[in-house]
Amino acid sequence: MIDLETVSKEDKRIYVLRDERPALAVVKLGVPLIAGMIIMVLYNLVDTYFIGLMHDDYRLAAVNLAYPVMMVTIAISNMVGSGASSLIARSLGAGDDEKACRSVTAGFSLTVFNSLIVTALGLALLPVIVRGLGAKDNTFAYTEQYVSVIIMGSIFTMGSYTFGQLLRSEGSVRYSIMGMIAGTAANIVLDPIFIFALGLGIRGAAIATILGNAVSMGISVMYYLRGKTLLRPSVKYIRPTSEILKEIFWVGVPATLETLLTSAAYIVNNNLAVDYGELTVAAMGVSQKLLSLGNYVYQGYAAGTQPIMGYNYGARRYRRMISVLKAGVLVCSGTELFIMLVYGIFAPQLIGLFSDTDEVIRIGSRVLRTIMWILPFVGAVSMSRMSFQAMGKPQYAFAITLVRQLFLYVPLLLILNKAFGFGGMIWAQPVTELIMMTASVALLCRVIRKEEALAEGR
């Protein structure tokens, strides 16, 4: 249960959500998350790096082809994590501590249940999934090896991701970061052991990733069991009420569809890239993974603002929400401009860390120097989506994703690829994010001001 005495003494976690200066609040919650997410992206970069040491670009391409499976697993985790986190933050803001505890417990129960379904269905449909990812003759066996392990270990990936979200929803960012750091450290140590020492190759990379997630999940669970958190799951709430389930899924299902649409767009992108050769897939995979370091910056700031927005929405403090949004966009865009500069200058050297093939380095540098242009715009889009989820208004968050992925990005991929070839295809994402930045921020400000007007009876 929640420690009511701790909350009555104005726990510093609540202070950050409620009273801290907007820019400082965004930095306090966002920067630790960014650090943790950058550490988390090392899961994939470490796999890519060690597999690159095998000097086999088909194995490198297979890791990229398999990535959407991890995205789908995280998407299902996000259904529970986003839904429960939004409900927890709003419940704390409204002073409903029991509902917040019920939501945490429901998050644990649903994660276990969902992971069992994912494992059973994934293994039954494994060959179909691998073909659907775009694997061809040279990459099919490697992709299948990697994907099968990821599916079997889905409980650990989902638990690591969801429990971290639950911790962040109450402001316990430091605890969620510790799990990420420990999991990544385990992956870095285990990768060379499983890949080279045990001779398991690409399968060993997947095993190391799963074990790293197991460590991360275990640490998050430990914090809950030892009573270090503001909220704790309770056995008496192990069966979620219909009201709790409804509220979790109301926010969570659109969040899952959002990630699934992103994954589907990624698959379309990979299937188009295959037509330019499997080395192009390898080059794009390395570029996308390097870009993910920049992606995690905006995702970290967005995830950091989510509990602030949810808490203040529950407390009906709408002006603070607008202030937090403005501060978040400015801080995020400034950080991303610096990262973009680094990518622009050092693209060949960065790609060269993962492959010594001249063609991969040439294509990868071109891709990275193009897609890096999403960085100044995409933070505002992500922050708007997360804010809508925090407010319990997932229909708007899903609408942003639907327009972004289904009506803009995928059509632009197809149109620009047909009109301008590979060069046109890689510009589809920057064009999409530029359009969506303006639309999503304008929509969020309009909804917040409407809520404020209703609350004041205007």
Image (cartoon, rainbow, N blue to C red):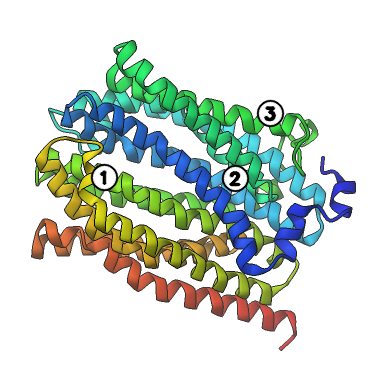
Question: Of the residues shown, which amino acid type is indicated by label 2?
Answer: Gln
Asked if residue 363 can be seen in this view, the reply is yes
- In whole angstroms, how far apart are the C-alphas of marks 1 and 2? 31 Å
Residue at x-position 57% and y-position 76%: 447
Residue at x-position 48% and y-position 25%: 186
Query: On the image, numbered disc 3 is attached to which residue?
Result: 222
* Mark seen at residue 350: 1
Looking at the image, which residue sits at the far top? 198
Is 393 drawn above or below residue 295 in the view shown? below
Image location (x, y in percent) of residue 99: 77, 49
Question: Of the residues shown, which amino acid type is indicated by label 3?
Answer: Met
| Pair 3/1: label in front | 1
Q: Nearer the viewer, residue 283 or 249?
A: 283
Q: Quadrant of the C terminus?
A: bottom right
Residue at x-position 23% and y-position 51%: 347
In the rendered structure, are the residues bearing label 2 and label 3 in contact, judged by CB atoms less than 8 Å apart? no
Is 333 drawn above or below residue 146 in the view shown? below
Query: On the image, numbered disc 2 is attached to which residue?
Result: 165
Image location (x, y in percent) of residue 456: 75, 83
